[in-house]
Image (cartoon, rainbow, N blue to C red):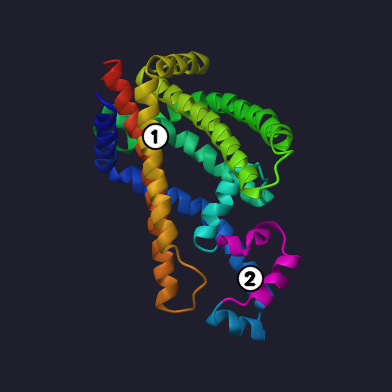
Amino acid sequence: MTTLAAFGEGMRRVARAPALLAGVLALTFLVALPLGVTLRTMLGGHLGASLAARDALNGVNYTWWQEFSAQAAGVGASFSPTILGFGAVLANLSAMADNLSQVPVIAAAGTAYVILWIFLAGGILDRYARNRPTRANGFFSASGVFFFRFLRLAIVALAVYWLLYHYVHAWLFDDAYPWLTRDFTVERNAFAVRLLLYAIFGALLLACNMVFDYAKIRAVVEDRRSMIGALVAATRFVLRHPGRAAALYLLNGLLFVLVIAVYAFVAPGAGGPGWSLWAGLLVSEIYLLARLFVKLQFYASQTALFQSTLAHA
């Protein structure tokens, strides 16, 4: 199977399992709901029956926003202008690229979300590998079988990413960048060097992510119990088929970039009440749905490529 064929087959497998997409969307909503309710309570308590509350109904009151941010704690500390529209995407990308810490409660929710994804990943990959409906019993049975295996793999992945951020990221941006730009007098040249370092670090992250994806796929398709064995086998697969594996990852990555680019043009800003508020909410939900579709597309297309390459049905 060629790279384009695997990409198209991944699209078909995702489209043939709409319940998976609806399920992960519901999961995302349920994880975010307690944070949203908590933030709503904090905002309501701070606004009360003040004049600022009346102004907030008609648009953004930045004076009040700054006052609220100065005293906010917990999830309230995340309520900043960067949450509006495309600013949230840029803030998340910047945090990942520059190794910035998150608000503890947001980090805790993110950790819970990742653990839930680890649980569901076995069922999702099993459904795409079989390429036929597995029903709820089959899905959750596969999820349960592979949960602790994937949890062990996640510990290895966490160690690898910690090494990348703690040592490689620190060396690139704290040591190499100042040394490379020490004699520069033009800001754009220094910015170009920083972009190059971002590209190098990003390539390392993506390569590790691709190997861990194929480790999960091999574990499910071949029913592997040893995650170290699955990781070694995944590395071997990527090294033996670097062109197809990288090209497919690039195609999926371009789909992800396309989704972000479209959202950048249509992302809602700070609007007033009424139809514009609901339109902005609808656009944001469609973007979230598209992001989740891309994540499932990664799983489905890589599974299709692996099965076709090694003749695994």
The amino acid type, in three-letter code, at marker 1 is Leu
Q: Is residue 297 magenta?
A: no
Query: Can residue 85 be seen at all in this image of the molecule?
Result: yes
Image position, residue 275 (x, y; %):
40, 77
User: Could you tell me the amino acid type at mark 2?
Assistant: Leu
Which badge, 1 or 2, comes first in the chain's sequence? 2
Specify few, some or many for label 2: CA neighbours under 10 Å numbering under 14, 14-19, or 20 or more.
some
Q: Residue at x 72, y 60 (%)?
A: 73
- The circle drawn on residue 8 is none
**Which residue is drawn at the image coordinates 50% and 59% (left, top)?**
86
Question: Can residue 138 be seen from the camera position used here?
Answer: no
Secondary structure, mark 1, is: helix
Asked which secondary structure carries label 2, the reply is: helix
Q: Residues within 10 Å of mark 1 (few under 14, many from 20)?
A: few
* Of 262 and 75, the residue lying toward us: 262
- Numbered mark located on residue 250 in the image: 1
Between 72 and 67, the one lying in front of the other is: 67
Q: Which residues are magenta?
A: 60-83
- Residue 280, how many percent across, how many down? 43, 67
Indicate the quadrant containing the C terminus: top left, top right, bottom left or bottom right. Answer: top left
Is the magenta region chiefly helix, strand or loop?
helix
